[in-house]
Image: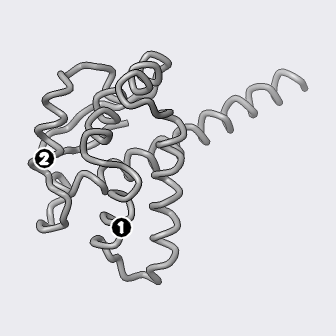
Amino acid sequence: MQFYLYYKSYDAEVTIGGIRKYQELTKRCLMRDLNRLSDIQQQLVAMENGEPNLAIRCTAIAEFMDMLTASALFYCCNGFAMPLSEFEDAVLRAGSRAARDDPNCLPWQLVAAGLAVDYDASFLDLVEDEGKKKAATDD
């Protein structure tokens, strides 16, 4: 997986080390926060009836997670490849309002939600693949 934050591409992977570090930095559970971000994103998309309201999405996500917590989320999902301060700076520069029509410079809330949705999809694919492998070995 990859995500773009303020014009820069980052690799993303959820690891047990990232989960531990996120809890240490934020006193929150990374998996729970990713699941909740994905839920918020999906609920808001479903309510929009085809007309995206990015301001409402950004506000709803910001009510759940602040900028420093989001910086820690990006840092921990990036496997500590970049310093936490780089993510703090990128989150600040990306801002919290959808002012540009540029997919490489979305507000940090939309980047966090997109990362969470991508993680959900990759996790479901992994579970499905494991189920198929198990079924094949059982036959």
How far, Cα to Cα, is label 2 from label 1?
18 Å
For the C terminus, the quadrant is top right
Of label 2 and label 1, which has the lower sequence position? 1
Question: In this figure, which colouring scheme has been used for the structure?
Answer: one colour
Q: Secondary structure at mark 2?
A: helix
The answer to whether residue 57 is above or below residue 36 is below
130 to the left or right of 102: right
95 to the left or right of 57: left
Q: Say which residue appears at 20% left-offset and 38% top-offset.
A: 9
The answer to whether residue 119 is above or below residue 24 is below
The amino acid at mark 1 is Arg
Residue 8, picture quadrant = top left
Q: Say which residue appears at 12% left-offset and 66% top-offset.
A: 100
Q: Residue 94: percent from the left, percent from the top?
A: 14, 51
What residue is shown with label 1? 57
Q: Residue 98: percent from the left, percent from the top?
A: 19, 66
The amino acid at mark 2 is Leu
Q: Name the outermost residue toward the top.
A: 17
Q: Say which residue appears at 45% left-offset and 61% top-offset.
A: 41
Q: Secondary structure at mark 1?
A: helix
What residue is shown with label 2? 92
| Front residue (pair 7, 67) | 67
